[in-house]
Image: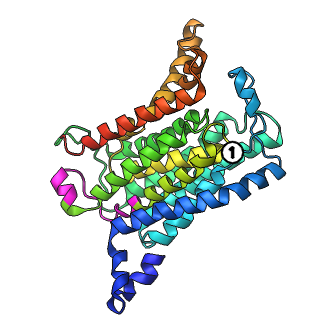
Amino acid sequence: MLYWWLYPLHTDIAIFNIFRYLSFRIIYAALTAFVIAFFLAPPLIRKLQELRLGQRIREDGPRHHQVKQGTPTMGGILIIFAVSLSTLLWADVRNLYVWIVMLSIVGFGLVGFMDDYIKISRERSEGLTVLQKFVAQIGIALSIGLFFYASPGYSTELSVPFFKTFTPDLGTLYIPFAILVIVGCSNAVNLTDGLDGLAIGPVMVASMAYAVVAYAAGNKVVSEYLLIPYIEGAGELAVLMAAVFGSSLGFLWFNTYPASVFMGDVGSLPLGAALGTVAVVSKHELLLILVGGVFVMEAVSVIFQVLFYKSRRKRIFLMAPIHHHFEMKGWEEPKVVVRLWIVAILLSLLSLSTLKLR
């Protein structure tokens, strides 16, 4: 809104010309989201404590996690608020892609809210059933996929990392593929959110990586130089991704070990959906496998554990998701978290290198 309101004044007041620069708005979107999250977190935590909205800890998990029982949860509400407000302030609100990603965030946030609310109100560690959660998520992702498929000129070709000319066209199969990317990323982030600060760190790293990708895809000169698809208007999503980074950084202050608040499904589901939706918009869906490598590793560990146990009645890991396996091996929680952050940073750097190594 600031861009919409203030930039037109640049003809009379020269300083407002700065709003035309995307880099300026990216930086201040991150700073604004951080300030909102940082200063609103303490009163939110107190309110969550008053309402007794505490986390229910799974009984089959590591025993030392039981001390976290009752820690305020649903802090993801703050992340959604900070991202939304900062984006509305600094992004061009006439950009349709911004609203599509915001729809994804709010929609998946509502699913997460219902999941968290059921857990708390019924005093159990499970909320919505798997079927209920997937039906709702697929419904939201389907509407997004159909919108993109029906948009004039929107390409259904895939940009494959490390390849210049290999761009397979999925045609109508692009719709289920987009659903897989958005829903898969959302649930992968949700599975990763099992230790203090574990999920929010890689989310920050991935959001900045996709801020770079969105900026490059939305800049005709840069996209032509890098030989990546040019998506007109995609650059504004760099502002939104910067807001995700800033709000996550502010939230991390209170979510780091030992956590004063958890984000809950109301935070993890929409953050993953936001990353997945931006990946679809920027036409770098497959890059998400690298950028979100930690999330992929967490999700795959659960899938393999379930399949292997059902087929052979044996477990591959001591416990899934894999971060619990490392805990069972004797790693302290902060060590697991920081080491997976390091992996996330390295994978994001590798993923960004693919923009040039083609």
> Is 182 covered by the magenta stretch?
no
Query: Percent x, y for residue 328?
Result: 60, 16
326 vs 170, left or right, is right
Instruction: State whether residue 309 is above or below residue 170.
Output: above
**Residue 276 visible, this orientation:** no
**Residue 151 visible, this orientation:** yes
Q: Nearer the viewer, residue 35 or 216?
A: 35
Instruction: State whether residue 252 is above or below residue 324.
Output: below
Q: Nearer the viewer, residue 322 or 277?
A: 322
258 vs 248, left or right, is right
Query: Percent x, y for residue 180?
Result: 46, 39
Please name the amino acid that badge 1 sits on.
Answer: Val
Name which residue lies at 29% across and 53% down: 155
Query: Percent x, y for residue 349?
Result: 32, 40
Q: Over which residues does the magenta segment extend?
A: 222-238
Name which residue lies at 47% across and 29% down: 339
Q: For numbered disc 1, what is the local secondary structure?
A: loop
